[in-house]
Amino acid sequence: MARNKKLNKKRISPNTVALIGAVVITLGGFFLFYNFISDKRLKAYDYMNEKITDRQTEIYDVTTKEIASTNTNEEQIEKQTKYKDIENYIGYLEIPKIKFRRGFYKIDSKLNNVESNIQIIKGSNMPDITNGNLIIAGHSGTGWKAFFKNLYKLEIGDNLIVTYSGLKYTYKITNIYKEQNTGTISIKRNYDKTTLTLVTCTKDDSTTQTIYIAELENIE
């Protein structure tokens, strides 16, 4: 009898089990909802950024008129402040095979980091520098900031496109290799070629990074 009483004391009541289950489900739903909202917010941010980059004068004029005609409207003033805080992209990276297109910022921008966007690595050269090397890093994995999550699908011969200063630079991947994820990488490229290098964590292996080397093929 004494043993049965001890066993009964150790059993978790059905109400406790139900409560734990409800908490787990709620937390799971929260994280899914957070990623969904973050992704939508990021897309809206990108949309405004592209509009300001491509049609800056037009949007500036419209916004100024709205503020001037409704200077007591706090919502419009707040909107204008948000627009002013958005920096312009200086170029775009496109990868047709995986339907990727994303803008990048100047190298000294506070938004030029992998926690906010794809990142231009210090020491890089812009595409208009002959025999230079533009190095772009990005997160892989999951979540809203995993911009390079599909790079693992790329192969030698695939095209990468950078739009910069009104010109389109088309590159072809010539080398793909891995290195240990130590915070530094070695660039194995032809120094007689103008190149583009992409860097991200290897799919399903956080201990290594995958490096994609592409050589310039065409300028339009």
Image (cartoon, helix red, strand yellow):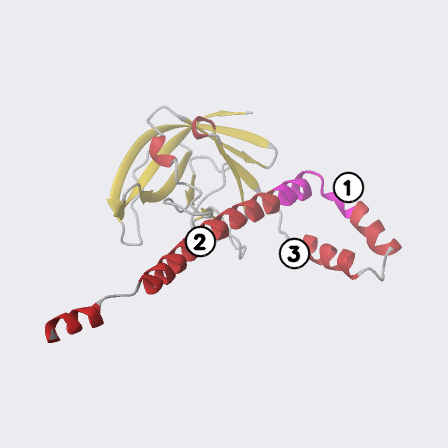
The prevailing secondary structure element of the residues shown in magenta is helix
Residue 94: horizontal and vertical position, in percent? 49, 33
CA gap between label 1 and label 3 equals: 17 Å
Residue 50 falls left or right of residue 159: right
Residue 154: horizontal and vertical position, in percent? 36, 30
Q: Residue furthest bottom?
A: 2
**Magenta extent:** 47-60
Q: Any magenta on residue 64?
A: no
Frontmost of labels 2 and 1 is 2
Image quadrant assignment for residue 48: top right
Residue 213: horizontal and vertical position, in percent? 35, 34
Q: Are marks 2 and 1 in contact (CB under 8 Å)?
A: no
Q: Which residue is mark 1?
A: 58
**Pointer 3 local density, CA inside 10 Å: few below 14, some 14–19, many at least 20:** few
Residue under the image location 62 percent in, 51 percent down: 87
Q: Which residue is mark 2?
A: 31
Q: Earlier in the sequence, mark 2 or mark 1?
A: 2
In the image, which disc is placed on residue 85? Answer: 3
Residue 147: horizontal and vertical position, in percent? 44, 43
Residue 84 falls left or right of residue 10: right
